[in-house]
């Protein structure tokens, strides 16, 4: 979280408010060159964003170019990846607000809008190709490739986005109120506590902590909060610490960056499932062997008992026979 990300998002929201019903004094098309990211108009006229989804796609690409493409020289790879994740949080929140869009995951929006859009498949910095710089810093050539290679972004369910975005906006408040020379310690502490409360709320939702997609979003929020805490002009003691991110074992799927070194498979489901199958086979085999052993033991125990009983009866009969002969 820095002045680049904060400034661009605040500027965007003046022209394109978070809520569809929220009015604004600014014209959407006056936001820089955002019109160029809209679909072509009728009969070859000006580009136009006729639907909310058109506007959302144009705003998303505008953010990518304004924050990532134009400012990448001053950002490291981790910061760039964090910024893209924040853009996806915002995008998911906005999609959740468009009730008639019938889009429940980013995957569908990606397929219909981002995948084949020229501006999302090319990295251009002031009309110059910046693909190689982005590749060197992040391992990805463009916005589209980043989403494709990190599938956790594609599977985020929109229903949790209002809560995630609520935490995201609190980070903006912390930056706004705690990062200047005239920071109000009491107000900073209040907003920081609100963020921690929201984080704890998310950290205790079962459907979130069991899902690795949300784990990565939580990790981004946690990292940015701690960065703000360390950079703030207010003493960090006014900022409460965040708890560790909860995670249910068995739902592990780590965020993966491209590496030139050979690595384990990106997603651990295949190898873990094989391990589970192996353990299950061993358990079943062991159980079967135990059942077979006790079956044999039980059978021979019965056989041995019958033999002992017969032997006892024969002895008893012989004894009775002797007594009978003596009495005669």
Image (cartoon, rainbow, N blue to C red):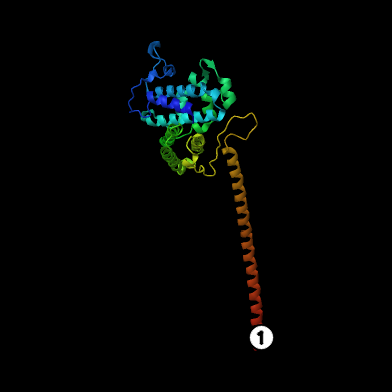
Q: Is residue 242 left or right of residue 287?
A: left
Give the residue displayed 44% in from the left and 30% down from the top.
90
Q: Position of residue 122 (x, y in %)?
A: 52, 19
| Tally of numbered tags | 1
Asked where in the image residue 99 lies, by quadrant, the reply is top left
Q: Position of residue 198 (x, y in %)?
A: 43, 40
Q: Is residue 74 left or right of residue 188?
A: right
Residue on which the image places disc 1: 325
Q: Is residue 98 above or below residue 131?
A: below
Q: Could you tell me which secondary element the residue under label 1 belongs to?
A: helix
Q: Is residue 222 above or below residue 327?
A: above
Q: Residues within 10 Å of mark 1 (few under 14, many from 20)?
A: few
Asked where in the image residue 292 lies, by quadrant, the reply is bottom right
Give the residue displayed 43% in from the left and 21% down from the top.
58
Is residue 328 in sight in this rendering?
A: no
Give the residue displayed 58% in from the left and 38% down from the top.
270
Asked where in the image residue 205 lies, by quadrant, the reply is top left
Q: Position of residue 190 (x, y in %)?
A: 41, 40
Q: Is residue 200 left or right of residue 315?
A: left
- Location of the C terminus (image quadrant): bottom right
Nearest the viewer among 290 and 118 is 118
Is residue 68 in sight in this rendering?
A: yes
Nearest the viewer among 110 and 32 is 32
Please identify the residue farthest to the top as the structure is shown: 44
Q: Position of residue 169 (x, y in %)?
A: 42, 33
């Amino acid at each position: 979280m820095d002045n680049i990300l904060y400034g661009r998002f605040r500027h965007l929201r003046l022209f394109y408010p978070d809520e569809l019903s929220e009015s604004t004094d600014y014209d959407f098309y006056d936001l820089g060159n955002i019109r160029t990211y809209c679909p072509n108009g009728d009969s070859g006229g000006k580009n136009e964003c006729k639907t909310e989804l058109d506007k959302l796609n144009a705003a998303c690409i505008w953010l990518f170019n304004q924050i990532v493409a134009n400012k990448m020289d001053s950002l490291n790879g981790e910061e760039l990846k964090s910024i893209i994740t924040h853009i996806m949080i915002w995008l998911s929140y906005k999609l959740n607000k468009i009730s008639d869009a019938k889009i429940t995951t980013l995957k569908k929006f990606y397929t219909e809008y981002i995948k084949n859009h020229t501006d999302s498949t090319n990295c251009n910095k002031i009309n110059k190709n910046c693909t190689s710089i982005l590749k060197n810093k992040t391992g990805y050539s463009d916005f589209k490739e980043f989403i494709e290679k990190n599938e956790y972004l594609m599977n985020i369910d929109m229903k949790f986005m209002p809560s995630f975005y609520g935490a995201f906006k609190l980070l903006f408040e912390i930056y706004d109120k705690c990062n200047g020379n005239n920071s109000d310690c009491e107000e900073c502490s209040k907003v920081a506590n609100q963020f921690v409360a929201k984080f704890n709320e998310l950290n205790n939702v079962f459907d979130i902590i069991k899902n690795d997609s949300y784990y990565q979003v939580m990790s981004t929020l946690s990292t940015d909060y701690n960065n703000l805490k360390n950079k703030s002009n207010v003493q960090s003691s006014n900022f409460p610490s965040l708890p560790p991110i909860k995670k249910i074992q068995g739902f592990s799927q780590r965020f993966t960056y491209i590496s030139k070194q050979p690595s384990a498979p990106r997603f651990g489901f295949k190898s873990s499932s094989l391990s589970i199958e192996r353990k299950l086979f061993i358990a079943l085999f062991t159980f079967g062997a135990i059942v077979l052993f006790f079956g044999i033991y039980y059978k021979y125990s019965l056989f041995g008992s019958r033999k002992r009983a017969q032997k006892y009866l024969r002895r008893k009969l012989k004894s009775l026979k002797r007594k009978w002969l003596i009495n005669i």
